[in-house]
Amino acid sequence: WIYKVNRDYCVLAFFARRVRTKDGKPLESIVPITKGRTICANSFDLYGKDAAQVFSHLRQLAQTYHESYLQYGLGFSNYNVTDAHNAGNILNHPNLITKSYIYNFLHPFLRTGVLTATEKKWHTRRSMLARTFHFDILNQFQEIFVAESLKFIQHFEGQNECVVSLRDRITIFTLNSICETAMGVKLDEMAEKGDRYREMFHRIDEGFTRRISNPLYWDDCAYNLFAARDYASALKVVHAFSSEIIAKRRVLLEEELEYRRATQTADDDICVARKKRFAMLDTLICAEKDGLIDNIGICEEVDTLMAEGHDTTSIGLVFGLMNMSLYAEHQELCFQEIQEHIEDDLSNLNLGQLHKLTHLTNFLKETMRLYPSIPIMGRQTIEETELDNGLILPKGSQINLHVFDIHRNPKYWDSPDEFRPERFLPENCQKRHTYAFIPFSAGQRNCIGQKYAMQEMKTLIVVLLKQFKILPVIDPKSIVFQTGLTLRFKDKIKVKLVRRKCD
Ligand code: HEM
């Protein structure tokens, strides 16, 4: 049982199938293998660590090895990718579509929606949802983003300056936006339930991290027996919230279809011929009528879109506004550009105008480079898989793509910790590796909502900058990051807003 993996270290890795190399070269000539804390190899490396310690442990490994590295757990190998070349190879590999084992920990929350599903189910759901992110549909969402952004700044009405704790306020904005755009339901009269959803979402996230760091909970039986009950009430709240949204939309859609039936021509297909705003949830409800999805399937996708669609953009905006406060010269460039292309009356704001804001685009890209909302993604092999660096991963190998480390890898980024939006000017991108910047992932399973996300983040910033200057409150060096479903941080991130007309 004792297996020698390198000269100075032996592991007891039961049943772990070994990674091999294509031409029989020593494994360590391609990839370094990390030492584990116990004889169970790396299985217990994270045991007892809290979310912040898990985050810094992963960063330390990246800094120690300066390249992708291999670990062994009880029964599986774990390939950790911190370089763009291997990331590109994995994201585009036709056999690496299945998400890694840890995504199973999301099943009690999201079941197998498009984010966690695999094979045929993933394919069907992905194509069903992808068409709802069409340019025309996104353009119709613009007025909602503007209205929600105006609601966001209304909160500061009557104040010439104020200090804002960003995360809570912004998450209200992003949750309202996803519910109204994708689901076609305004949260106004459900605001309290929305607050409770956000609170419970956070709790589920804590449970996810607790499970990652304790291999005793990797098995469903042990987890269900000893830990699941701590999160049962949180799951009940989030599922009740999404079910209520679905029920509300069913009623609204029926009323709308009733109206259309009264006005349509004889052979129009009602679900296809709708010309007005097209909520994504409507697509799913219409697909249900065609027998392509059932109610559980709709719940899976609504839970997935709500989770993915509000938390990620919220993090992007928190760090975007923090960076606006820290880099006054870039804030000014963004403001000037906004004034040049976008009139103060925002009722006609459209995607074409947002597209002209190139400095703001680069600013947001640089923000997502340093603070990617999803700092780690995972895949697993469903059969023996050869990578183009010569590694042969056995079936069941886990692959972690450390986006956070790729985005700060000095191989691709000069002074990686410095904030420099000009890195994304076309002339500066040409020589950079395509997969050195992957905040929205890449390949077949890339982010379905990336255009939506950029549109939403830009709209809030446009509305905010037109009325306020943003000044710094915190020192970014004091931020303590935590591992979670998305990029987490311990303390509140605050900025100061100063109304422009008071200058
Ligand atoms: C700044 C905002 C966002 C970032 C950085 C982001 C990033 C990502 C990343 C990295 C993935 C791949 C995840 C993985 O492989 O584990 C992903 C997948 C996904 N994202 Fe986003 N996302 C954002 C916003 C959104 C929004 C607004 C929506 C929906 C409205 C959305 C919907 C999805 C869905 C459904 C998937 C799963 C796609 C699949 O597996 O086929 N995302 N996103």
Image (cartoon, helix red, strand yellow):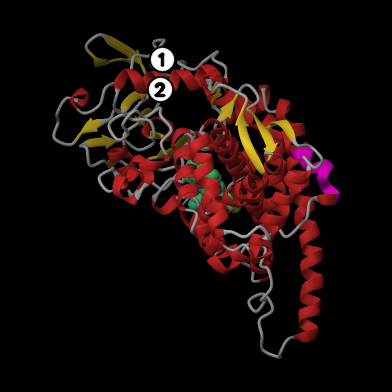
Q: Are marks 2 and 1 in contact (CB under 8 Å)?
A: yes
**378 or 156: nearer the viewer:** 156
Relative height, residue 298 to residue 153 (above, below): below
As for residue 304 lying within the magenta part, the answer is no
Query: SS of the residue at dot 2?
Result: loop
Q: Which residues are magenta?
A: 189-197
Q: Residue 334, image x and y in percent?
A: 52, 46
Q: Residue 292, image x and y in percent?
A: 61, 66
Q: Which mark is residue 40?
A: 1
Confirm whether residue 116 shows in the render: no
Q: Which residue is mark 2?
A: 73
**32 or 223: nearer the viewer:** 32
Q: Residue lying at the far bottom in this picture: please name it.
A: 266
Among numbered discs 2 and 1, the one appearing first in the sequence = 1
The amino acid type found where label 1 is placed reads Cys
Confirm whether residue 150 shows in the render: yes
Q: Residue shown at 29%/24% (left/top)?
A: 66
Q: Quadrant of residue 136?
A: bottom right
Q: Quadrant of residue 58?
A: top left
